Image (tube, rainbow, N blue to C red):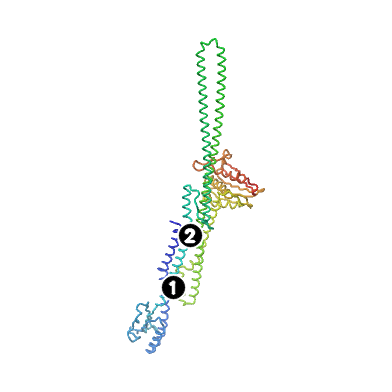
Amino acid sequence: MGLRTKIFLPIFLASVILAAYISAVWTPRWRSGVEAIYRESEKRHLESVADGLVPFLLGNQLDGIYSTLDALLSKNGNWVDIQLFDPHGRVLYPLDASRLPKGNESHDIRILSQDIQYAGSRLGKLAVKVDLTGQLRAINTWCSHLLTMLLVVMFLFLLSTVVVLEQLVRKPIRLLSDASQRLAGGDYEVPLPQPKNDEVGVLINSFAAMRDAISMNAERLSTTNEQLRSEIAVRKQAEEELHIQTAELEQEVAERQMAQERLQAQAGLLEKEIEEHKKAQDELEKSNESLEQRVQERTSELNERNDEVQRAYDDLKMVQSQLLQQDKMASIGQLAAGVAHEINNPIGFIISNLGSLGRYVDKLTAFLGSDEQLCGGCDPAIRELMMQERKKYKINHICQDLPELIAESFEGAERIRKIVQDLKSFSRIDSSAGALSDINEGLESTLSIAWNELKYKATVTREYGRLPQVWCNLGQLNQVFLNLLVNAAHAIKEQGEIRIATGEKDGTVWIAISDTGQGIPPENVSRIFEPFFTTKEVGKGTGLGLAIAYDIVVNKHGGTIEVASETGIGTTFTITLPVTRAALP
């Protein structure tokens, strides 16, 4: 499901549900309530008319009755017909058979009747046919206008959202997707769309920076591989020379042995030359000793060269691993920045829509309040019925609860925006530029990123001091803080405490990160900053985290990093950084 569908579908469904509710539930109920109010009003009017006819009926004044009923029928436009019956059900008025006027058969006609009584005796019955067509038609027209206005507003909102998303988000993202596929195929000169001054433009700039970083790191990796191949070729050539020299020495030894055998074969024939033979043998022994000494010297020299080649190979391997780690972190940082910007855009829509919704709720609340004030001047029975309807649908509770719901939604959206800002700030680890930065703010940003790793293992205690602005690369220092905090969480088995303290002393700032974990054995304390050294299980640690932290703090920021640990109690890492730019290396 695409981003556009995820945003449109809830809004569309809410609009359909609201329109269906107004059309199918609210309108009929409102119409029935208004009709009941009118019927009750006409019923009371009919009761007053029946009371006014009592004297005429007692005096049998038919002319007065006819004139009164004729006047009422002409005066009340809603009364279509009036019939008066005696106690036996005979029609007293009108004299001829009464029926509805022609053309009124389809009107909303309601028949109301009222017994005429005096002193407990029934004098007759009065029946009236009331036409409520005009009132009910006005209610239907008002409800239709409300529903039409709601549908038009929702349609315009959806249409504007489609246009904005298509032009500002979907089109640049499609172009970036095509560029990423070409970048994956090795095309480092892939063109990118022109960035604008918005979140998508920042994403395009971040993608361009990632492309340049990948291209640069690919060139550096290629150069490193060429150097490694050259060193391997030199080592192979040295091994071949060693094999050749060994073969030559073995050949010389074989020749010496053959000469010695010839001399021994001729010993019987050369008895007279024993002294000369002894001298020759002494010389031969001296030559053998000299030859063995040369072989040992050559072997020692070759071993030393092999050790140098091995050390160079290990150094190149460490540099290659560090470059791969830095490239990986840079790529992850760029992708995290892109995701943060991508989330920030719909969050802006949500906050804006919540603001519009709050204003709409205020207007609806004001409308309901005005409606209540207008009903205050109505008939008491109508006002009472309106109050019962408000209680039935809990209108007062809804008006009180809606602002709280919108405020809570605002708070949640602002929390998401804060996390996105921390993620964007933390993701800028590939930049080598320095700037005046707030160390406490960097620690808070790192805690926000690592909170999911820490909250289940430890409680975090902050003891921040008042620090000056420090010239540093805050993105690189955030990586150092993250490595130390994650290591502290891993050192705690079940539940413990992580304490973060900062302060200033003699032109430097210090940061101390302590934990109540297992501690570091004394024999490993001196090796924890060595590359590839780790005490974690195989597959759970690369041994580069603290080595990279040491490089960032000491070599790149001219600071110091010290560790104090006691087995079973905990570990404290203390980082010291110079405040001024002149103190950096």
Q: Earlier in the sequence, mark 1 or mark 2?
A: 1
Residue 431 in view, yes or no: yes
Q: Residue furthest top?
A: 272
Residue 437 location (% of width, % of height): 61, 52
Q: Is residue 358 left or right of residue 133?
A: right
Q: Which quarter of the rendering shows the N terminus?
A: bottom left
Q: 417 or 299, which lies in front? A: 299
Describe the element under mark 2 as helix, strand or loop. Answer: helix
Are discs 1 and 2 less than 8 Å apart at CB? no
In the depicted view, which residue is nearer to us: 323 or 469?
Answer: 323
**Is 266 above or below relative to 404?**
above
> Where is residue 249 shown, x and y percent of the image?
52, 24
- Judged left or right of residue 502, residue 107 is left
Q: Which mark is residue 167?
A: 2
Q: Secondary structure at mark 1?
A: helix
Q: Which residue is mark 1?
A: 142
Residue 36 screen position, x and y as percent:
41, 75
Give left or right: position of 100 versus 241.
left
Q: Residue at x 47, y 54 (%)?
A: 175
Location of the C terminus (image quadrant): top right
Residue 492 in view (yes/no): no
